[in-house]
Image (cartoon, grey):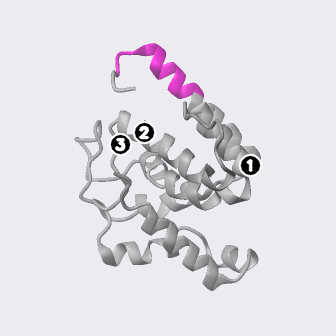
Amino acid sequence: MRDAGDIEARHQLMFASTLAGLAFGSAGVHIPHAMSYSIATLRHEFTAAGYEERDPMVPHGIAVVINAPAAFRFTASANPGRHLEAAAALGADVAGAAPEDAGEILAQAFIALMRETGLPSGSPRWLCRRRRAGAGRGSVRPATASRHGAPQRFQQDLERLYRDALRYW
């Protein structure tokens, strides 16, 4: 993943990206993906490796990934078994895991992968306090929030997700 000359790794990454695209097509866009838009579109001081020749920016993939552990913790209660299955696929030991621990187990397995690949620990380097406070408003249109329940509760959930995604280690 870190060696640009590793053709097999690049092939596997492109294939994984294709599978993710297919999954989005059948499952809809998930929370970390929706959160990524408000992070990626802010003015940044961050420059990702491989993007040094461009203006500071957060690439879309990184903007998605940094939100994933917070989203896993948030969504685990809806389907703990699926979260544990995903954690096991990432190499986590889920033997004897309690359903209420599913989100944390998956989040930690994903965080380990983030660390291994040199990704940042959340988003605090990019978002000042003022921007973080408004980030949730940019991720989902108000009409969407109104259709899916009480807008106030929805906004509180989004703010919690953004707060939880600030730092993982």
Query: Looking at the rendering, which quadrant does residue 128 occupy?
Result: bottom left
Q: Nearer the viewer, mark 3 or mark 1?
A: 3
Rendered image: mark on residue 27: 1
Q: Please report whichever mark, 3 or 1, sits nearer to the chain's N-terminal start.
A: 1
Task: Answer yes or no: is residue 108 visible.
Answer: yes
Residue type for callout 1: Ala
Earlier along the polypeptide chain: callout 2 or callout 1? 1
Q: Say which residue appears at 43% left-offset and 60% top-offset.
A: 165
Tell me residue 96's x, y (percent): 66, 40
Disc 3 secondary structure class: loop
Instruction: Name the residue rendered at 46%, 22% in the picture.
Output: 10
Report whether 41 appears left or right of 37: left
Q: Is residue 40 above or below residue 119?
A: below
**Pointer 3 with pointer 1, Cβ within 8 A:** no
Q: Nearer the viewer, residue 26 or 41?
A: 26
Please state which amino acid type lies under the numbered disc 2. Answer: Ala
Alpha carbons under labels 3 and 2: distance apart: 10 Å
Q: Nearer the viewer, mark 2 or mark 1?
A: 2
Q: Nearer the viewer, residue 145 or 51?
A: 145
Pointer 1: residues within 10 angstroms few (<14), some, or many (20+)? few
Residue 100 on image: x %, y %: 65, 56
Marks 3 and 2 in Cβ contact (< 8 Å): no
Q: Position of residue 58 (x, y in %)?
A: 36, 52
Q: Quadrant of residue 93?
A: top right
Q: Which residue is mark 3?
A: 119
Which span is picked out in magenta? 4-15
Give whichever of 41, 32 is nearer the camera. 32
Residue under label 2: 112
Q: CA distance from mark 2 to mark 1?
A: 25 Å
